[in-house]
Amino acid sequence: MLSKHDDIHKSIQQGVSDESLPLLQQSKGDDCPILLNGEVLSCFSHWSDADRDNFMAFKHQVNPVLLGRGRDTVNLDKSAILPILHEEFVAQAGFGEVFRVQLHPECHTFRDVLPSVDTTEWFALKRLKPRERGDLSKQALGFKKEVDALQRLHDRPNQHIVTLLATWAIEASVHDRYCLLFPWAEGDLKSYWKHQRYPCDGTKMDLDAIRWVTKQILGMAGALKTIHSPGYNNSLEPKQKYGRHGDIKAENILWYPPSAPNEKGTLVIADLGLTEFNSTQSRSNVPGEGLSATPGYRPPECDLKGGTVSRAFDIWTYGCLLLEMVCWMLGGQRLLDEFEDRRTTPGIHGTGTDIFFEILSKESRVSQDRLQLPGTLELAYQKHAIAVKGEVHEVSRNPV
């Protein structure tokens, strides 16, 4: 290949440039010529078959993919070189896997695309995998569903809804077939509760932290409103659609670290894989029985015969999240664990379930024993909660 340097000038004269790469090769015929915009490039005509095949085999190595924001999924050849310098496995995520990846800074256009999140070097890559071996049709359906939900919100950006930076599909690949790229978050809300100091520790209260929590609660409520009523674009569909996230929980709330000193970061609703969009007629008539939901957070209508779910499903699950948030504010991880233990009841198969409700028959008598704290501890929390309530009310009036 080193002996072909004279052909570089000829290829430029015939219109070959970085923008025209990768070149295509005609699959039919005796000599399989190399094409540009459907026309045969004569600068390759005197090359041997082996030289042309080598050129086509290694063409992607000098033409890595340039990643940029866009609404459409980019279809890539299996030989395409992605600008990933380093990757490390992070966690399973539903029917996918999440990796922390480092992108070459010259091969993406995400720098400073989000004002409150660093998008310079490290990103989160979610690779969807088949639910069953070779089950590519369901994999494609799950991919399309999540991408559609995120792209539907593309025109209504909200700093408390995760931003899809790019998405691509790799042809003839199973493990890397469908990929979604997001800004990298340092953790989820569950890990934040575990590792961060809670704001109402004893008699000392961190008013800045309380202000931050109330601001995040308000911001996420606004994000849910955006998902529930994303707006209407009659060029995309004939009728207004209404959304339901379907899986609000601490693990699906991401924490992005602060972009400036003396800030505490941003909580962002993520994982829209179960998000549904329905019309006015069907938005409140989705059968609750058998619906995919996190067991502990599911609302009562999922367990009631003939129950149907609506956008109120998210209000219930968000309310469960806020109860846990209040527990963390009052007593940190210790009170969170105690709250989970006291609401856990034996399940049908002997395993505990930490749901936030009980279904009782009319003849049943409600027992409050498992929800009551020991006398002295209950009194202490009661006094502390009253004091905290006053402080939260005061600072939330001026959250700054």
Image (cartoon, rainbow, N blue to C red):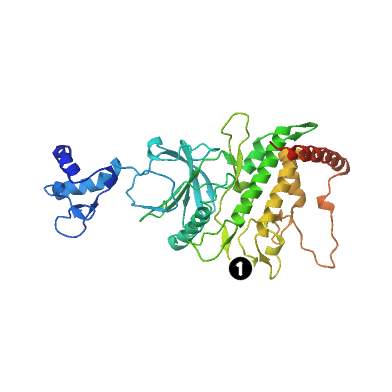
Which percent across, then down, holds residue 347? 71, 59
The residue sitting at 61% across, 40% down in the picture is 266
* Left or right, 139 with reference to 321: left
In which image quadrant can residue 245 be found?
A: bottom right
Mark 1 residue element: loop
Which percent across, then down, holds residue 100? 48, 41
Q: How many marks?
A: 1
Which percent across, then down, holds residue 291? 62, 63
Which percent across, then down, holds residue 352? 71, 54
Of 259 and 87, which appears nearest the observer? Answer: 259
Depicted 185 relative to depicted 240: above or below:
above
Q: Residue furthest left?
A: 46
Depicted 72 relative to depicted 198: above or below:
below
In which image quadrant can residue 227 be found?
A: bottom right
Picture quarter with the C terminus: top right
Q: Residues within 10 Å of mark 1 (few under 14, many from 20)?
A: few
Q: What residue did someone put label 1 on?
A: 282
Q: Is residue 35 something one can see in this rendering?
A: yes
**Amino acid type for the residue under numbered disc 1:** Ser
Q: Is residue 296 something one can see in this rendering?
A: no
* Left or right, 6 with reference to 347: left
Picture quarter with the N terminus: top left
* Left or right, 144 with reference to 349: left
